[in-house]
Amino acid sequence: MPALIDDPSVPAPWKRVKDEATGYEYYWNVETQETTYDKPTTESVAAAARAAEGDGTFDDIGRAEYAHGGNLTYDASQKVVTFDAAPPEARILEYRKKHEISVTGGGCPPPFLTFEEAQYPPDIMGEIQRAGFTAPTPIQAQCWPIAMAGRDIVGVAKTGSGKTCGYLLPGLMHIRARNNDARAGPTVLVLAPTRELAVQIKEESDKFGYASGIRNTCLYGGAPKGPQLRDLRSGCAVVIATPGRLNDMIESNLVSMHQVTYLVLDEADRMLDMGFEPQIRRIIARCP
């Protein structure tokens, strides 16, 4: 359930909103129903109002920065707005600079600046639209093309930046491509340090996997194994787990990792700090 946050620094008609289910924060225009992850400013609101009015206040022939690079040009005498797109390379550099994205590694693919570029199927796009998201967050934009290319990623971003969907949605696409029998074991494995984080990840997996018919289960200690085992036997393409409980189930031959080809370590640094490295190594050793 989205909750409004009182933030006097956000100019009207925008409101700061927090999705309590995911922890994501974004900004909502109460007049146009538009949403964005970029904080609106007084200047951006004024520029948008001038552009909407088309009154020539862009200095007769003025320019406004376009979010992905290039310029909007308003000709007051002709009352025409044109857009001159920046070269693709320039757009990529401008996007990364604007969102403070630093990339290391050879041959990194460019970010997906729109959901359409990711080519998600209609069921996933439907969930994205129902959530009110208008564009990928920066970590999603850059991680998606890398994950979809089958490459390894180490992604670092602050809480509420959309990291979960940054790895989850490509994981769902990977499951479709592999088309494994989920009753023989998961294709996607997500390890998390705590029960609380694992449950949050499951909620996102429920949201985006339900329409696709992709089932998941959450394995963590301090809860009965019975319901978790029933889920596994019914077939779960996605397993979200804490290392201790999963390692226990593997060693008891209750779950197989032989189909896992998409592995995520969520908050990996925290898991190492908590002493989970031996369990993680044993789990990874069971994966192909």
Image (cartoon, helix red, strand yellow):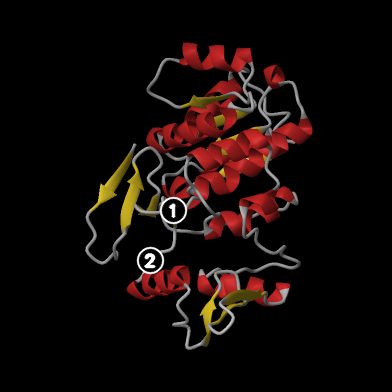
* Image vertical order of residue 11 relative to residue 193, above or below: below
x, y percent for residue 40: 38, 66
Looking at the rendering, in which quadrant would you find the C terminus?
Answer: top right
How far apart are the alpha carbons under marks 2 and 1?
10 Å
**Callout 1 crowding tier (Cα within 10 Å): few <14, some 14–19, many ≥20:** some
Q: Which amino acid, by three-letter code, is at mark 1?
A: Thr
Question: What secondary structure is marked by label 2?
Answer: loop
Residue 259 percent across, percent down from the top left: 73, 29
Q: Which residue is mark 1?
A: 35
Q: Is residue 59 left or right of residue 96?
A: left
Q: Is residue 288 above or below residue 249?
A: below
Tell me which residue sits at (61%, 42%) in the image: 169
State the image quarter where residue 232 is shown.
top right
Residue 179 image point, x, y percent = 77, 28
- Tell me residue 155's x, y (percent): 56, 57
**Which residue has dot 2 on it?**
40
Residue type at mark 2? Pro
Disc 2 and disc 1 in contact, CB within 8 angstroms:
no
- Closer-to-camera residue (71/68): 71
